[in-house]
Image (cartoon, rainbow, N blue to C red):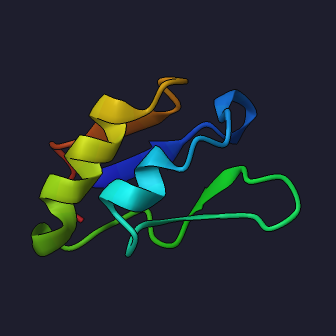
Amino acid sequence: MKVHLYQERCVSSGQCVSAAPDVFDQRDDDGVAFLLTDSPSLDMASGVRQAARVCPALAITVDESSAD
């Protein structure tokens, strides 16, 4: 699984951080999300998928085919 976050689309809602706090965090100055890892472990996969579903800006994509 590979995760990509389009920071330029981020609206700082924090939904991704709530869904997958081991994968996403937010900058203190403006709340824009950033990735802690772009290759989450299998035990994080459910939270990452949820983060992508609930992101109001559609700023997260998940590549399930990646073997990393």
Residue name at image x 34 percent, y 66 percent: 39
Residue name at image x 62 percent, y 59 percent: 34
13 relative to 21 in the view: left or right: right
Between 42 and 66, which is closer to the camera in this rendering? 42
Instruction: Identify whether 24 is placed above or below 1.
Output: below
Instruction: Identify whether 15 is placed above or below 46.
Output: above
Rendered-image quadrant of the C terminus? bottom left
Does any portion of residue 23 appear in the rendered image?
Answer: yes
8 relative to 21 in the view: left or right: right
Instruction: Identify whether 7 is placed above or below 25.
Output: above
23 relative to 68 in the view: left or right: right
Between 25 and 35, which is closer to the camera in this rendering? 25
16 relative to 33 in the view: left or right: left
Residue 56 rendering spot, x and y as whole percentages: 48, 25
How many callouts does the rendering have? 0
Rendered-image quadrant of the N terminus? bottom left
Residue name at image x 61 percent, y 36 percent: 6
Residue 66 rendering spot, x and y as whole percentages: 21, 51
Does any portion of residue 67 appear in the rendered image?
Answer: no
Q: Name the image quarter holding residue 5.
A: top right
Residue 18 rendering spot, x and y as whole percentages: 39, 59
Residue name at image x 52 percent, y 72 percent: 36
Between 68 and 24, which is closer to the camera in this rendering? 24
Between 64 and 47, which is closer to the camera in this rendering? 47
Residue 63 rendering spot, x and y as whole percentages: 27, 40
